Image (cartoon, rainbow, N blue to C red):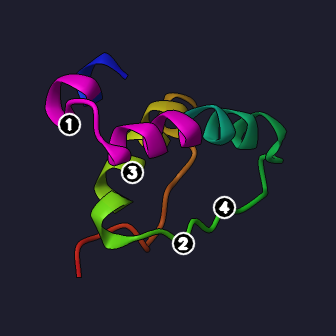
């Protein structure tokens, strides 16, 4: 979160990411290996949320498919 704070300062987006981070960690904890996660979010937050998801899910080689690419 320090990198986000450096990038975003003290903004509403930082507050949103700070709120979402523990929720995404918990989703990762309870998600079955065969489970899916669909995250619908604002385009302004999508790339920041992708970084959070990558930090949780990429560590265990869970494939992420679709959805977060720029349109």
Residue position for label 4: 37
Residue position for label 2: 40
Asked if the residue at tag 2 contacts the one at tag 1, i.e. Cβ–Cβ closer than 8 Å, the answer is: no
* Viewer-side label of 3, 1: 1
Could you say whether the residue bearing mark 4 is in a helix, strand or loop? loop
Compared to residue 18, the image places residue 20 above or below, namely below
Q: CA distance from mark 1 to mark 4?
A: 26 Å
Could you say whether the residue bearing mark 2 is in a helix, strand or loop? loop
Whichever of labels 3 and 4 marks the residue nearer the N terminus, that label is: 4
Residue position for label 1: 8
Compared to residue 32, the image places residue 18 above or below, namely above
Give neighbour class at mark 4: few <14, some 14-19, many 20+ (Cα, 10 Å).
Answer: few
Residue appearing at x 57%, y 65% in the figure: 39
The mark tally for this picture is: 4
* Viewer-side label of 2, 3: 2
Q: CA distance from mark 3 to mark 4?
A: 12 Å
Could you say whether the residue bearing mark 1 is in a helix, strand or loop? helix
Residue appearing at x 66%, y 61% in the figure: 37
Q: Residue 10 colored magenta?
A: yes
**Residue 28, how many percent across, how many down?**
70, 39
Q: Main secondary structure of the magenta part?
A: helix
Q: Which quarter of the image is occupied by the N terminus?
A: top left
Residue position for label 3: 50
Q: Horizontally, is 20 left or right of 13 in the view? A: right
- Which residues are drawn in magenta? 5-20
Furthest residue to the top?
2
Q: CA distance from mark 3 to mark 1?
A: 16 Å
* Viewer-side label of 1, 4: 1
């Amino acid at each position: 979160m320090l990198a986000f704070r450096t990038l975003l300062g003290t903004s509403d987006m930082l507050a949103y990411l700070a709120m979402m981070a523990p929720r995404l960690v918990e989703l990762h904890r309870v998600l079955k290996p065969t489970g899916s996660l669909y995250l619908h979010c604002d385009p302004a937050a999508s790339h920041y949320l992708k970084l959070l998801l990558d930090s949780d899910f990429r560590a265990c080689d869970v494939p992420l498919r679709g959805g977060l690419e720029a349109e």
